[in-house]
Image (cartoon, rainbow, N blue to C red):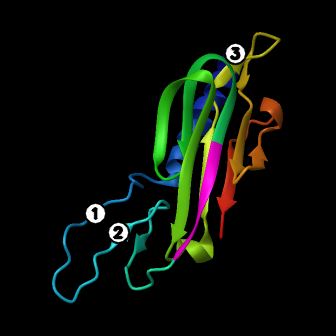
Amino acid sequence: MRKTTTLTTTLLAAAVLLTGCGSEKKDTGPAKAGEASPSVSASGGAKGSSSGKKGVAHQVVFEVGGTGTGKVMWIGNTNHFEQVTLPWTKTESIQLEGAELKVGVTVSVVPASVEGPDRMLKPAPCTIKVDGKQVADNQGGKSAEPCKYELKD
């Protein structure tokens, strides 16, 4: 049981480190005359207003199965880590813009740990759906990998 808990904690820490900190969109205030006001994208990269291109909005649904409560981390428009009641679903609308149109954005969910039939902790089942189509899963909790998908236009 301790080994599974340590694995889950390690996976959560690795996911947080890999995604970076502070990926929320930020307003840097009004631009000076003749200057473009940069903002920060969902993936954390700087975007200038010179391209102005935006992709189509995608509906992204994060799901974690199981019963009880657990900590879930998901990355969509921003990074989130919170205690939730299982089963859990979160829907976000994500619109790529600027450089994201070329490179895409990774969306992911790290599921909570749930007790398996052998009373050992294991990852809860997770899925990601984009525009109604399932694009990622962890094989019903059989894989210790988080559910992740590279969203591109």
Identify the mark nearer the N-term, 2 or 3: 3
Secondary-structure class at tag 3: loop
In three-dimensional space, the C-alpha distance between marks 2 and 1, rounded to whole angstroms, equals 6 Å
- 43 relative to 113 in the view: left or right: left
Q: Quadrant of residue 56?
A: bottom right
Residue 89 or residue 4, whichever sits in front: 89
Name the quadrant of the N terminus. Answer: top right
Task: Indicate whether 61 appears above or below 31.
Answer: above
User: Where does label 1 land, which residue?
Assistant: 27
Q: Nearer the viewer, residue 48 or 53?
A: 53
Label 2 close to label 1 by CB (< 8 Å) = yes
Identify the residue at image location x=39%, y=85%.
Answer: 50
- The amino acid on which the numbered mark 2 sits, given as a three-letter code, is Ser
Q: Which residue is mark 2?
A: 39
Element class at badge 2 = strand
Q: Which amino acid, mark 3?
A: Met
28 relative to 1, above or below: below
- The image position of residue 49, as x and y in percent, is 37, 80
Q: Residues within 10 Å of mark 2 (few under 14, many from 20)?
A: some
First-in-chain label (1 vs 3): 3
Q: Which residue position is annotated with label 3?
A: 1
Among numbered discs 2 and 1, the one appearing first in the sequence? 1
Q: Taking 41 as reference, is 142 left or right?
A: right
- x then y, percent, for residue 139: 83, 37
Residue 5, disc: none
Q: Which region shows up in magenta?
A: 54-61
Please, what secondary structure does the residue beneath circle 1 have? loop
Measure how far apart labels 2 and 3 are at the Cα level: 44 Å
